[in-house]
């Protein structure tokens, strides 16, 4: 029998570890001591090692693959090419999103096989897998394979790829345009622009970035011939959805695939899809009858992991004479890379459109973006997946319009905020915002950042020969679309309570806030709650982690499941306490008979039901297996302030101040939320100031390693002031809104606008990311030359 917990102890524990408390993350002790178990830490008896052979051409026809010498090398167990996998008849990788072209036709698919058989379409396209007794043997054999590829012209720019005469990646996709996306009432938007007193226009590049998760992708595959069942361990963002996708690719029933995910060293959207390597090692494991392990190297990750962002946009904002927004529209191109998989077209098109109108009562907007195939690494979701992009475009337009119309940039925003009295508000995106206080968030950000004291700080910088700039930027995100989520609660024999859900922690710290919610709902001790998310045999459903949905989705599942537990508990408690279940009430983890002190704690009740002989109608356990059918989107929002200092002699930019005030609805764990903000802002600093994936004219990647691709370091990240100004979300019982991607959504425009504010002394009105020291220095020199 477990230790007894008194009602008073329960109440104190709920208060200490309840919703809203900054409880330390459960997993940190394990991770900080280096005791985490990531995929590459795993070893299976008799495992072999795989190495992928990739194309070194961006575009070309495969004329031959000669692996005869490689097969004879020491330790080599097997080599498979595209022809071998084609004979196994696996399904191609594709995109399941129901996106349509402006003419109503569906998105044009790019069926991709795990290993290419006819053409290669980017540097890194996999063409063969080698499996050997050791990793070095596999790698040596791969280098001995003679790969004959006839090069074809390549194109890496989405805008160039859509032009007549550009190299064609697929015969069935004219001009390489897989999706010609349109949203909005074109006639109404055009009329608003025609009637506008002022139109601001900007050409903006939203740069391509590499994800560079701390943990490279890795996988360990096994096959059991007796049960005809595949088992694969790999980092994902949700085991249920990825298991279903793998089963579809393998053309087997779901129960023939067992997917396990251990701890994950970052993903940011990139690991939420299946990749060719996984099919290859599953095929090899089946053929060899032994486990096969593959782990990517960093240089391979730059080639094979999906990239993010990559848009070339023409943005326009129409205003009346008083500065009221009339309409906003964007057009341009999004770079899909060589293949369409997962959700890759959505961030470039649909999600950008959903988030464009932000916190402003812009009556109309339109989006016209061509999603184009190029000879580059495939595109995917990257932290925010369209949300940071849209907010970046809108906030850049607002600052530019304020300058052109000579209206104070703060006043222009205040004039156009959606007012609390207008909520619920149907935005021009078609989304209905249920809650928010956008002006209140804005004012608090000004206060916490000491915006009023900036003039003095700018004078101090000038005395030291430095330029100083500040910017304020609001954002709003439409989180993941409605989706189901699992909330399974199991009362263990040892007195613990296990929560099983379909979201998956890849760095967010789910175990702690989920336990806080469950403890608040059921009054069970926080420390006795464990979380399971990683095994597809147990997690039978759920939509995974992504789109800032986890606390809302699993939180809603916990609340509904807890109600079912309490309902079962009242019936069971009534039987044990010899009364009617109508006379049982539940509070702080204890069932009691109304008006008396007779009662039983929930954990004791769960134990007494175990193995007991019970009459019909009395539940034999308090366990619940419940799936919430649809968790709606929420609308986290906020206002960030960035302050920068620039050395005009070198162009070096330092972020010297950063404030973020956010409305995340109910905040379950402020400490974890602050950590999410810090990480997102750090990634925003990286994209705004230094990160960019680049290719040469032949499609060869120039930024193929951390020697070439700049990443922010600790010294680049300032101390941050994080503020909270919540309004309760009306779409879910906890009132949460999600926070995981807000740091990126709020930081891009804020940082870029702050740099341009500093550079306004030279009349510089626009620069594209990344605002590297060289780019800033050259802009200053060009401005000096023009002024001379």
Image: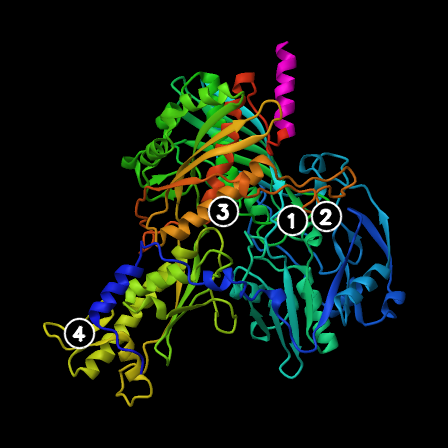
- The residue that disc 4 covers is 592
Front position among marks 1 and 3: 3
Which residue is farthest bottom? 613
Neighbours of disc 2 within 10 Å: few (<14), some (14-19), many (20+): few
**Residue 239 x %, y %:** 53, 65
Q: What stretch is highlighted in magenta?
A: 774-788
Mark 1 to mark 3: distance in Å?
35 Å
Query: Looking at the image, is mark 4 or mark 3 nearer the viewer?
Result: 3
Secondary structure found at label 1? loop
Residue 679, numbered circle:
3
Tell me the residue that label 2 is attached to: 172
Contact flag, marks 1 and 2 (Cβ < 8 Å): yes
Q: Which mark is residue 108?
A: 1
Label pair 2/3, CB-CB below 8 angstroms: no
| Mark 3, other Cα within 10 Å: few <14 / some 14–19 / many ≥20 | some
Q: Where is residue 176 in the image (x, y as percent from the top left)?
A: 70, 42
Q: Quadrant of the N terminus?
A: bottom left
Query: What x and y, as percent, mark residue 556?
Result: 36, 59
Residue at x 58% of width, y 55% of height: 96
Which badge, 1 or 4, is on the more N-terminal residue? 1
| Outermost right residue | 69
Q: Is residue 479 found left or right of 665 in the rendered image?
A: right
Please report the residue visible at 57 percent of the width from the left and 51 percent of the height from the top. 343
User: Which residue occupies the foreground of this view, 279 or 504?
Assistant: 504
Give the answer, above or below, for where 321 lies relative to 581. above
Structural crowding at the residue carrying mark 1, measured as other residues with C-alpha within 10 Å and reported as few (<14), some (14–19) or many (≥20): some
Distance from label 4 to label 3 (Cα)?
45 Å
């Amino acid at each position: 029998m477990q230790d007894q917990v008194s009602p008073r102890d329960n109440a104190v524990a709920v208060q200490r570890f309840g919703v809203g408390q900054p409880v330390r993350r459960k997993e940190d002790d394990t991770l900080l001591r280096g005791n985490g178990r990531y995929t590459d830490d795993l070893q299976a008896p008799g495992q072999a090692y795989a190495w992928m052979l990739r194309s070194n051409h961006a575009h070309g026809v495969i004329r031959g693959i000669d692996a005869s010498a490689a097969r004879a090398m020491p330790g080599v167990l097997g080599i498979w090419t595209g022809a071998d996998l084609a004979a196994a008849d696996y399904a191609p990788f594709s995109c399941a999103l129901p996106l349509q072209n402006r003419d109503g036709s569906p998105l044009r698919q790019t069926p991709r096989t795990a290993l290419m058989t006819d053409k290669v379409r980017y540097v890194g396209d996999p063409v063969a897998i080698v499996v050997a007794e050791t990793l070095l043997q596999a790698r040596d054999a791969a280098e001995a394979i003679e790969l004959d590829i006839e090069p074809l012209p390549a194109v890496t720019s989405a805008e160039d790829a859509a032009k007549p005469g550009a190299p064609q990646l697929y015969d069935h996709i004219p001009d390489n345009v897989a999706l010609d996306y349109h949203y909005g009432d074109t006639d109404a938007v055009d009329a608003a622009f025609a009637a506008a007193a002022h139109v601001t226009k900007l050409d903006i590049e939203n740069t391509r970035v590499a994800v560079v998760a701390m943990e490279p992708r890795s996988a360990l595959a096994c096959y059991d011939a007796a049960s005809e069942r595949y088992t694969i361990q790999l980092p994902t963002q949700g085991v249920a959805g990825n298991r279903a996708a793998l089963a579809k690719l393998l053309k087997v029933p779901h129960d023939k695939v067992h997917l396990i995910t251990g701890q994950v060293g970052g993903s940011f959207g990139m690991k939420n899809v299946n990749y060719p390597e996984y099919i290859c090692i599953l095929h090899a494991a089946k053929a060899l009858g032994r486990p096969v392990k593959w782990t990517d190297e960093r240089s391979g990750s730059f080639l094979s992991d999906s990239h993010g962002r990559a848009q070339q946009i023409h943005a326009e904002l129409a205003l009346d004479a008083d500065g009221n927004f009339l309409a906003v529209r964007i057009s341009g191109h999004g770079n899909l890379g060589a293949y369409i998989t997962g959700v890759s077209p959505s961030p470039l098109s649909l999600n950008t459109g959903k988030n464009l109108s932000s916190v402003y009562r812009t009556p109309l907007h339109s989006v016209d973006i061509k999603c184009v195939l190029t000879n580059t690494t495939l595109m995917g979701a990257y932290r925010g997946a369209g949300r940071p992009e849209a907010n970046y475009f809108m906030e850049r337009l607002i600052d530019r319009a304020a300058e052109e119309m000579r209206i104070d940039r703060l006043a222009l925003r205040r004039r156009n905020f959606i007012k609390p009295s207008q909520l619920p508000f149907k935005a021009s995106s078609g989304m209905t915002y249920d809650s928010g206080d956008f002006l209140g968030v804005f004012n608090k950000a000004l206060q916490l950042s000491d915006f009023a004291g900036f003039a003095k700080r700018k004078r101090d910088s000038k005395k030291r020969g430095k330029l100083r700039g500040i910017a304020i930027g609001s954002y709003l995100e439409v989180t993941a679309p409605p989706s189901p989520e699992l909330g399974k609660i199991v009362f263990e024999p040892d007195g613990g309570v296990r929560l099983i859900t379909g979201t998956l922690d890849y760095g967010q710290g789910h175990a702690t806030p989920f336990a806080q919610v469950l403890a608040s709902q059921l009054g069970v001790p926080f420390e006795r709650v464990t979380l399971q998310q990683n095994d597809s045999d147990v997690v039978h459903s759920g939509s995974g982690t992504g789109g800032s949905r986890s606390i809302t989705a699993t939180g809603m599942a916990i609340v509904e499941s807890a109600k079912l537990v309490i309902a079962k508990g009242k019936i069971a408690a009534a039987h044990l306490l010899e009364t009617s279940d109508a006379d049982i009430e539940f509070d702080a983890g204890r069932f009691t008979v109304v008006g008396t002190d007779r009662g039983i704690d929930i954990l004791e009740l769960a134990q007494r039901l175990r193995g007991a002989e019970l009459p019909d109608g009395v539940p034999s356990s308090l366990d619940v297996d419940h799936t919430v059918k649809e968790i709606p989107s929420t609308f986290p929002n906020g206002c960030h302030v960035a302050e920068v200092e620039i050395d005009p002699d070198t162009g070096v930019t330092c972020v010297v101040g950063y404030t973020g005030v956010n409305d995340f609805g109910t905040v379950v764990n402020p400490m974890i939320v602050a950590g999410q903000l810090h990480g997102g802002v750090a990634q925003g600093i990286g994209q705004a100031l230094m990160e960019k994936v680049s290719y040469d004219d032949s499609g060869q990647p120039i930024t193929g390693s951390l020697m070439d691709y700049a990443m922010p370091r600790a010294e680049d990240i300032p101390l941050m002031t994080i503020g909270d100004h919540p309004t309760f979300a009306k779409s879910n019982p906890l009132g949460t809104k999600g926070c995981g991607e807000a740091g990126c959504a709020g930081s891009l425009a804020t940082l870029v606008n702050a740099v341009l504010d500093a550079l306004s002394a030279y009349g510089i009105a626009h620069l594209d990311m990344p605002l590297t020291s060289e780019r800033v220095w050259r802009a200053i020199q060009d401005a000096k030359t023009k002024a001379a």
